[in-house]
Amino acid sequence: MKYAVLHRGDELSKQLSDKFHQLASEHRLVQDDVQPEIVISIGGDGTMLQAFHRYMNQLDSIAFVGVHTGHLGFYADWKANEIELLVKLMSEHAVKDVIGPRIVKYPLIELSINLDEGISRSYIALNEFTIKGVDGTVVAQIDINDQLFEMFRGDGICISTPSGSTAYNKSLGGAMVHPSIESIQLAEIASINNRVFRTLGSSIVLPKHHHFDIYSRKQQRLLLTIDHINVPLENLQSVRCQVAHQKVTFVRYRPFPFWNRVRGAFLGYDEQL
Ligand code: NAP
Ligand code: MN
């Protein structure tokens, strides 16, 4: 079993990372930062976002697992004191073990960004993609499946994955979506609604094989965010967003249902966590 560890950089996460390496060598696990089979993220959900983007080109061969050194996370759902158990399970069970469900796969967002002069870029997001105005109101046309849907004016637009629905999307009043539902959700960021300007107002959930196109409808400086990554742009033409073909794999050595994580993180009924 080849593994890599990525930690948040604070003292506790660093100590835990050192401890992990020590335990791993005792269990004859091999550190391989270039082609790991399991990537252990130690810190918070933000650390998992960094781990995901670091290994984004190897999603088919990597499973992720998150240990939290602060509060319970959605991706970081192992406690610091469970690290011995985690190493033991890793040494006993290959990720591709057929006995028992050892992994879970979550949907991602695929983005194709078109800039002036025919330049295009593509990205994958684990949590969400947002488009926000730098100087003021964003003006954008939103199409669904190549049909005009609405003209958006406001602070911005957030398109999230199911596992990202508990992050930025939740602050915007979006719905919590179970990660078994292959979908993307659009939530508005402070849309302007009056007799002249009109948007739907509610969040929209699209299934796989449907897509949003967002067209920039004025000369505007925009800030695009892809998870924790900021991309300032002045020359955006359009962005296509859809459920990605690829998925991200998480190690699931023991059950920890999504709804229990939602309850634990937001409602605090954490006696079982
Ligand atoms: P951050 O400022 O530390 O993140 C904000 C909070 O979101 C942190 O508490 C983070 O947890 C948590 N978080 C990240 N992914 C989550 C998920 N899937 N479900 C529930 N909570 C989640 O910055 P960051 O750590 O680099 O994370 C970037 C993310 O922050 C973005 O992807 C976006 O979702 C979120 N964000 C939220 C808002 C908002 O709610 N108004 C605004 C901007 C960005 P940890 O403390 O464990 O890292
Ligand atoms: Mn963070």
Image (cartoon, helix red, strand yellow):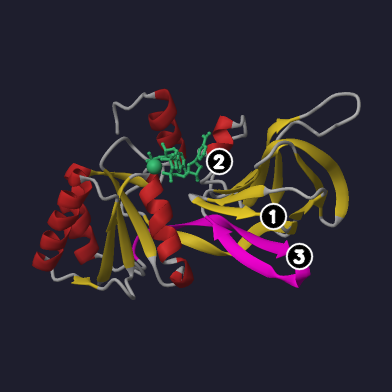
Q: Earlier in the sequence, mark 3 or mark 1?
A: 3
Question: Which mark's residue is nearer the viewer, 2 or 3?
Answer: 3
Residue in the picture at 38% in, 58% down: 51
Q: Nearer the viewer, residue 51 or 92?
A: 51
Image x and y of residue 171, in percent:
56, 31
Name the residue beneath numbered marker 3.
116
114 over 271 or under it: above or below: below
**Kind of residue at disc 1:** Glu
160 over 190 or under it: above or below: below
Residue in the picture at 85% in, 24% down: 194
Residue 133 falls inside the magenta stretch: no
Q: Residue furthest right?
A: 196
In the rendered structure, find residue 234 and report the number of the disc placed on it.
Answer: 1
Q: Nearer the viewer, residue 156 or 255?
A: 156
In the rendered structure, find residue 165 and report the number of the disc placed on it.
Answer: 2
Asked if disc 2 and disc 1 are in contact, CB closer than 8 Å, the reply is: no
Is label 1 in a helix, a strand or a loop? loop
Q: Is residue 248 left or right of residue 151?
A: left
The residue segment tinted magenta is: 99-125
Question: Which mark's residue is nearer the viewer, 2 or 1?
Answer: 1
In the image, the residue with mark 1 has its CB under 8 Å from the nearest atom of ligand 1 = no
Asked if disc 3 and disc 1 are in contact, CB closer than 8 Å, the reply is: no
Residue 106 falls inside the magenta stretch: yes
Instruction: Work out whether residue 156 can be spotted.
Output: yes
**Kind of residue at disc 2:** Ser
- Spatial separation of the CA atoms under disc 2 and disc 3: 31 Å
Q: Nearer the viewer, residue 145 or 34?
A: 34
**Kind of residue at disc 3:** Asp
Residue in the picture at 32% in, 71% down: 36
- Spatial separation of the CA atoms under disc 2 and disc 1: 28 Å
In the image, the residue with mark 2 has its CB under 8 Å from the nearest atom of ligand 1 = yes
85 over 158 or under it: above or below: below
